[in-house]
Image: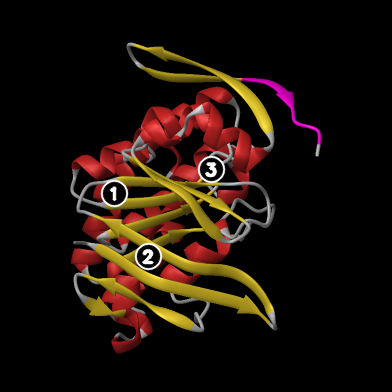
Amino acid sequence: MKLKIDGLQFSYNSTPVLENVDLRLKKGEMLTIIGPNASGKTTLLKCINNILKPQKGTILIDDRSLNEMSMTEIAREIGHVPQAGSKSFPTTVFDTVLTGRKPHGSWRPSERDLKMVSNTISRLGLEHISMKNIGEISGGQKQKVLIARALAQNPDVLLLDEPTSSLDLKHQLEVLDVVDQQTENGISVVMTMHDLNLAARYSSKILMLKEGKIFAAGDVDVLDPKNIEAVFGVKVDIVDRSDGLMIMPEEPIEC
């Protein structure tokens, strides 16, 4: 088991945000966490990455507790791509990806670091912009760069918080295709997402959160009309096509 979570609980001050969350993820699986705003999706990712400390519960990477690991060790195991922001730093794409190698050495990059960064940039098709300032590239390209930075850490687990937010449809598919390729390389992926159709298309597992609790979990079949209605308050029609589910919203449910 690559990632194992048992009985996770987290509160901001006295307000519960996550309650009794359990999770299992094997090597090469992609888990998508879905739920309404403020259901605890981003908080769960931050707990997995040790940015937030849960009040109760355990998080294990290959049967080793995060509490037993240093921040450097965690950074070697877990790559984190936060939600896209508007801030840009005056650095090139190459140097941005290179920062992902910091958990593996000193501030002075080695030949191995430079080679891995070059290979990662090539793998994601970013060679033509590698010397551009990151503030000069498109949103879709920037998201790929942030994924490349996380992959340069050589992680076993990749966390992505809304990786397709603010992207047009083409770049959404390009970014998720890149993420999907990482599972074929043995990386386990946990991501949050609002788009249920994209979640159904790319995920091997789904975790549905409602008010900080797991409402349903399993393969994409948990995305059925009854569960979606209960979690999101929207009636949907679902068509099971040969290439996956198509989820079509019909109307909100009056509370």
143 horizontally vs 200: left or right? right
Q: How many marks?
A: 3
Any magenta on residue 252? Answer: yes
Mark identifier at residue 120: 1
Q: How far, Cα to Cα, is label 3 from label 1?
A: 24 Å
Q: How far, Cα to Cα, is label 1 from label 2?
A: 11 Å
Q: Depth check: give the residue in front, 224 or 40.
A: 224
Query: Which badge, 1 or 2, comes first in the chain's sequence?
Result: 2
Tell me which amino acid carries mark 2: Gly
Q: Depth check: give the residue in front, 83 or 220.
A: 220
Give the residue at x 45% y 40%: 129
Choose top left, top right, bottom left or bottom right for residue 183: top left
Q: Position of residue 67 (x, y in %)?
A: 35, 86
Tell me which amino acid carries mark 3: Met
Please name the residue that numbered disc 3 is placed on. 193
> What span is colored magenta in the figure?
249-254
Secondary structure under the numbered disc 1 in the rendered image: helix
> Quick one: label 3, few (<14), some, or many (20+) residues within 10 Å?
many
Quadrant of the snapshot with the N terminus = bottom left
Query: Which badge, 3 or 2, comes first in the chain's sequence?
Result: 2
120 horizontally vs 148: left or right? left
Q: Position of residue 223 (x, y in %)?
A: 46, 33
Please name the residue that numbered disc 2 is placed on. 100
**Farthest residue, direction right:** 254
Tell me which amino acid carries mark 1: Thr
Color encoding of the figure: secondary structure
Label 1–label 2 contact, CB within 8 A: yes
Label 3–label 2 contact, CB within 8 A: no
> Quick one: label 2, few (<14), some, or many (20+) residues within 10 Å?
many
User: In the figure, 105 relative to 205: above or below?
Assistant: below
Query: Which badge, 3 or 1, comes first in the chain's sequence?
Result: 1
